Image: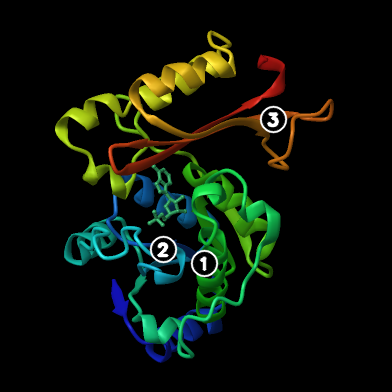
């Protein structure tokens, strides 16, 4: 596995592969890797001859007071995991390489970036699209893989990037149902025991054992509720007669840690 931290060195290798007619799949990450990230690499392999993973903690998607400074940075472990997973090449750029003109935020995804997670993190999706566009410009992949765990992010990336096929990977969960996340490391032992209630309660909505109002009340027994919404999974707008898939989307705070999760299901189950 090759590891590049400069754009020039990375592109020289990518060009070699392209010359041979090889297809390139790309998995952008912020490191702190877990099985969820690794599952995206397996998806990537199905779509291409070569898999490139980036590790870059993107300052543009953190607001003042968020966890940019303390976000888990586990480069050595990450590289070992990627090598074992059969990744061809890792890109670990500096912030200067990604933002040579400084970090002026020149992307605005509009209203879709202000709902759901955008209510508490209004800067977030603009920062995500900014870095994804920049990484796509550098890597020029044929395919890029994103996790359904970050469902709104996946939806926005599909709508606000072009020229790259966007594919998605299933949510990978711990055995007790908690969606894997780098930020799960922030949970205390006691919090970690409570955290699976999030997925459990969303499952009860899907199975119609709980309506949204009672589910919100249940969630509030364990968490500080950020949002809980049922929307059309294709549009992220209100459910209409034309809705075929429903998204249950939720974010909660457990102590200082923010957890997100979702369940997508076909309408006939409702
Ligand atoms: P991050 O490093 O958190 O920015 O995530 C990088 C990619 O991994 C994103 O496309 C995420 O949606 C995806 N991802 C994170 N957690 C999971 C998970 N538990 N299952 C599947 N994909 C995930």
Disc 1 on helix, strand or loop?
helix
Among the two numbered marks 3 and 2 on one chain, the one whose residue lies closer to the N terminus: 2
Residue at x 31%, y 45% (from the top left corner): 35
Task: Say which residue appears at 40% left-offset and 26% top-offset.
Answer: 198
Q: Crowdedness of circle 1 by 10 Å Cα count: few (<14), some, many (20+)? A: many
Q: CA distance from mark 2 to mark 1?
A: 8 Å
Alpha carbon separation for disc pair 3 and 2: 31 Å
- Residue at (47% x, 85% y) in the render: 16
Is mark 3 in CB contact (under 8 Å) with mark 1? no
Farthest top residue?
209
Q: Is residue 138 above or below residue 64?
A: below
Name the residue beneath numbered marker 3: 245
Q: Nearer the viewer, residue 221 or 26?
A: 221
SS at mark 2 in the image:
loop
Report if the CB atoms under discs 2 and 1 are less than 8 Å apart.
yes
* Residue 156 located left or right of residue 40: right
Q: Secondary structure at mark 3?
A: strand
Point out residue 91 in the picture as x, y percentages from the top left corner.
Answer: 36, 75
């Amino acid at each position: 596995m090759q590891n590049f931290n400069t754009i020039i060195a990375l592109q020289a290798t990518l060009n070699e592969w392209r010359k041979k007619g090889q297809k390139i799949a790309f998995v952008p990450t912020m490191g702190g890797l877990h099985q969820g990230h690794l599952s995206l690499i397996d998806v990537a392999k199905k779509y291409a001859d070569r898999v490139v993973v980036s590790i870059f903690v993107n300052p543009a998607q953190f607001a003042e007071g968020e966890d940019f400074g303390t976000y888990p940075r586990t480069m050595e472990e990450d590289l070992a995991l990627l090598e074992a997973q059969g990744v061809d090449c890792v890109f670990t750029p500096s912030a200067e390489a990604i933002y040579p003109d400084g970090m002026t935020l020149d992307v605005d995804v509009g209203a879709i970036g202000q709902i759901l997670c955008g209510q508490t993190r209004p800067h977030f999706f603009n920062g995500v699209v900014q870095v994804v566009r920049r990484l796509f410009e550098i890597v020029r992949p044929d395919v890029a893989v994103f996790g359904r765990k970050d469902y709104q992010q996946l939806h926005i990336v599909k709508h606000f990037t072009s020229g790259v096929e966007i594919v998605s990977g299933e949510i990978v969960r711990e055995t007790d149902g908690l969606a894997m996340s780098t930020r799960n490391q922030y949970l205390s032992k006691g919090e970690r025991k409570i955290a699976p209630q999030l997925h459990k309660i969303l499952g009860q909505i899907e199975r119609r054992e709980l309506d949204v109002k009672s589910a919100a009340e249940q969630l509030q027994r364990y968490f500080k509720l950020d949002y809980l919404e049922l929307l059309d999974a294709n549009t992220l707008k209100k459910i209409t007669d034309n809705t075929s898939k429903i998204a249950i989307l939720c974010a909660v705070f457990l102590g200082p840690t923010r957890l997100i999760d979702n369940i997508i299901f076909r309408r006939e189950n409702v």
